[in-house]
Amino acid sequence: MGRLADIRRLVAKNVRRLRKAKGLSQAELATDAGLHQHHVSEIENGQHDLRLRTIDKLSWALGVRPRDLFEE
């Protein structure tokens, strides 16, 4: 696997973990972040390359810093 795939997997794991810790469904997170639920599902499954704007929206909706999505 390449570095990009590793980053997608790491962000996917963190988004899912943080979402569940907040007690949010994918649909609720999508609404809070201004995204479609399908988009959140793809992100959590590591199937979507993230734009900075999306990272910002997700981190805001989860109440964390953008860099928190990239922590091991």
Image (cartoon, helix red, strand yellow):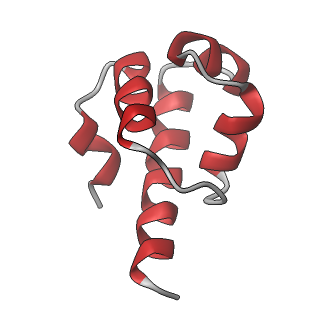
Tell me if 41 is positioned left or right of 53 in this view: right
Residue 7 quadrant: bottom left
Q: Position of residue 2 (x, y in %)?
A: 46, 86
* Residue 20 in the image, given as x and y percentages of width and height: 56, 30
Q: Is residue 68 visible?
A: yes
Question: Which quadrant of the rendered structure holds the C terminus?
Answer: bottom left
At 49% across and 62% down in the image, what residue appears? 8
Q: Residue at x 44, y 28 (%)?
A: 58
Q: Quadrant of residue 30?
A: top right
Q: Is residue 24 visible?
A: no
In the image, residue 30 above or below residue 9: above
Query: Between residues 60 and 49, which one lies in front from this camera angle?
Result: 49
Residue beneath the point at 54% across and 11% down: 32
Residue 10 rendering spot, x and y as whole percentages:
43, 61
- Image vertical order of residue 64 relative to residue 41, above or below: above
The answer to whether residue 47 is left or right of residue 14 is right
How many numbered markers are drawn?
0
Provide residue 33's location: percent of width, then percent of height.
Answer: 51, 18
Q: Residue furthest bottom?
A: 1
